[in-house]
Amino acid sequence: MHRFAYSTNAFTKFSFRQTIKKISQLGFRGMEIVFDRPHFEPKYFELTLRQAKRSGLAISNINANTAQLLKPFYKSIPSLISPDNISRTLRVKYTQTAIDLARDLGARNISLTTGPAPRGVSRKKLQTFFRSSLEQILEHASKKNIRVGVEYEPGYFIDNAEKTLAVIKKTNHKLLGVNLDLGHAVVAGEDPARVIRKFAGRIFNIHLEDIKGRTHYHLIPGQGNMDFIKIKNALAEIRYRGWLTLELYTYPHQPVRAGRLALKHLRKIFKT
């Protein structure tokens, strides 16, 4: 039986306490916590941590993809491939803190992205920066026994399945895998079912949304062109038993309605 979670990034207009309540009332068994504003930021950190522990919801993933909370220190958000050592170190430490948070809350994994490639820097150098960042992150993850899922995203340095697989194979670490956003696969021109099979055994969490055409805009499942029956069959084929996490940050003014419609459609498809 598949377990559905809802990412907190759909609830940026609500407090974390309200977010927990609404996700639970919708019938989701878990939530993905986005380690970023408006819920997880320094002045609310301890309060949010206590609320998460008391929520009664399982944690499908700690999402360390964004890090807007680091932006006040720099003109742009520090990334794991930044040519600037200080920026890169800051992003590594932020990701390590996400790992600590995952351990504290009983989550099995975190997710991360590379961010866009800086202009004027060779791909070889960026690969070196990313590899160095990953080594530090995985060293910390090993101490906490937390899995690290790379999420590829259109427009980013790592933007498709092939590049993500190459990183996983070259790094060759048991705690490194993929946080697979199936909508991103569609935008990248990939077949989600085929991608699922490629990553068999290395999928730590799945982001679900719908996509129309190849436009990168997260839609409520059932309102785009994605073939969820094929996705369901592929997941069954590889015997995936992890979380299916709904990611609808595009509906900040109606996350409850979006979540309700999405869960209804997904339950119909997955028969849960």
Image (cartoon, rainbow, N blue to C red):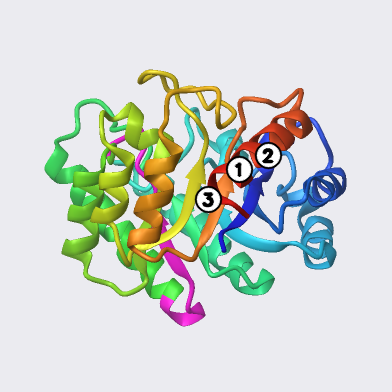
> Mark 2 belongs to which amino acid?
Lys
Pointer 3: residues within 10 angstroms few (<14), some, or many (20+)?
A: many
| Numbered range of the magenta stretch | 142-157
> Mark 1 belongs to which amino acid?
Lys
User: Is label 3 or label 2 in front?
Assistant: 2
Q: Earlier in the sequence, mark 3 or mark 1?
A: 3
Q: Position of residue 230 (x, y in %)?
A: 37, 42
> Mark 3 belongs to which amino acid?
Ala
Q: Which residue is drawn at 68% across and 44% down?
A: 8
Q: Residue 64 carries which label?
A: 3
Q: Position of residue 20 (x, y in %)?
A: 81, 50
User: Is label 1 or label 2 in front?
Assistant: 1
Q: Nearer the viewer, residue 27 or 115?
A: 27
Q: How far apart are marks 3 and 1 (CA)?
A: 31 Å
Q: Position of residue 184 (x, y in %)?
A: 38, 34
> Which residue is disc 1 drawn over?
268
| Quarter residue 187 falls in | top left
Report the side of 59 relative to 122 (left or right): right
| Quarter residue 236 falls in | bottom left
In the picture, the quarter occupied by the N terminus is: bottom right
Q: How far apart are marks 3 and 2 (CA)?
A: 28 Å
Q: Does the magenta stretch include residue 56?
A: no
Report the side of 30 relative to 88 (left or right): right
Q: Which of marks 3 and 2 is nearer the N terminus?
A: 3
> Which residue is disc 2 drawn over?
264
Q: Residue at x 14, y 36 (%)?
A: 122
Are discs 3 and 2 less than 8 Å apart at CB? no
Q: Position of residue 214 (x, y in %)?
A: 35, 20
| Quarter residue 36 falls in | top right
